[in-house]
Amino acid sequence: MLEAFVMLSGRLGRLAYFGYSLALGLVMAVLAAILILPMYHSPNAGGVLVVVLVLLGVLGFWGGLALTVKRLHDLNLSGWHYVWIGVLPAVLNGIARATQSLPVGVAALVLTLIFGLFLMFWPGTDGSNNYGYRP
């Protein structure tokens, strides 16, 4: 199970992608609570809090990247498609924040929704494809 969040090779079907995504969110929330709550009343917890949040951010990003690359492999697409699936909405969101442009922000949100729904509901390749076999 841990390899689903670490390795970038292999394939992941729709239901497994959904389940592992939920599990990743739950694990990240529990880890955040375990690591951050004890520092709540500490007077100089700022530096430790930043380190914990960066660590959780890196772990969450890598886990989400691994799941998405596996899902793209199931669709017989290269994992490099994650670059435009993940980066394009992020860049648009950054532009929207910098320019205070609501239409660009809405476009970023719509693209994120479309990409998410595509990954969640588009059927993968049955049998073998360029990235392995899945029954």
Image (tube, rainbow, N blue to C red):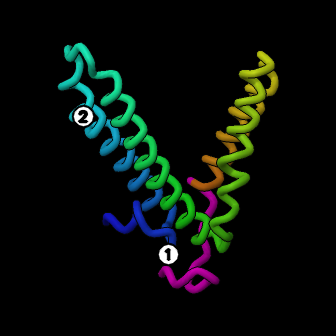
In the rendered image, residue 116 lying in the magenta stretch gets the answer: no
Give percent across and percent down for residue 33.
25, 31
At a point 69% along the width and 55% down the height, the residue shown is 83
Give percent across and percent down for residue 108.
73, 34
**Above-or-below relation of 106 to 66:** above
On the image, numbered disc 2 is attached to which residue?
35
**Above-or-below relation of 128 to 73:** below
Q: Residues within 10 Å of mark 1 (few under 14, many from 20)?
A: some
**Helix or strand or loop: what does disc 2 sit on?**
helix
Which residue occupies the foreground of this view, 18 or 62?
A: 62
On the image, numbered disc 1 is attached to which residue?
10
What's the magenta region? 120-135
Give percent across and percent down for residue 100.
77, 16
Label 2 to label 1: alpha-carbon separation: 32 Å
The quarter of the picture where residue 16 lies is bottom left
Which residue occupies the foreground of this view, 130 or 96?
A: 96
Quadrant (top left/top right/bottom left/bottom right) for the N terminus: bottom left
> What residue type is disc 2 on?
Leu
Which residue occupies the foreground of this view, 109 or 44?
A: 44
At a point 65% along the width and 48% down the height, the residue shown is 86
At a point 77% along the width and 28% down the height, the residue shown is 95
The quarter of the picture where residue 31 lies is top left
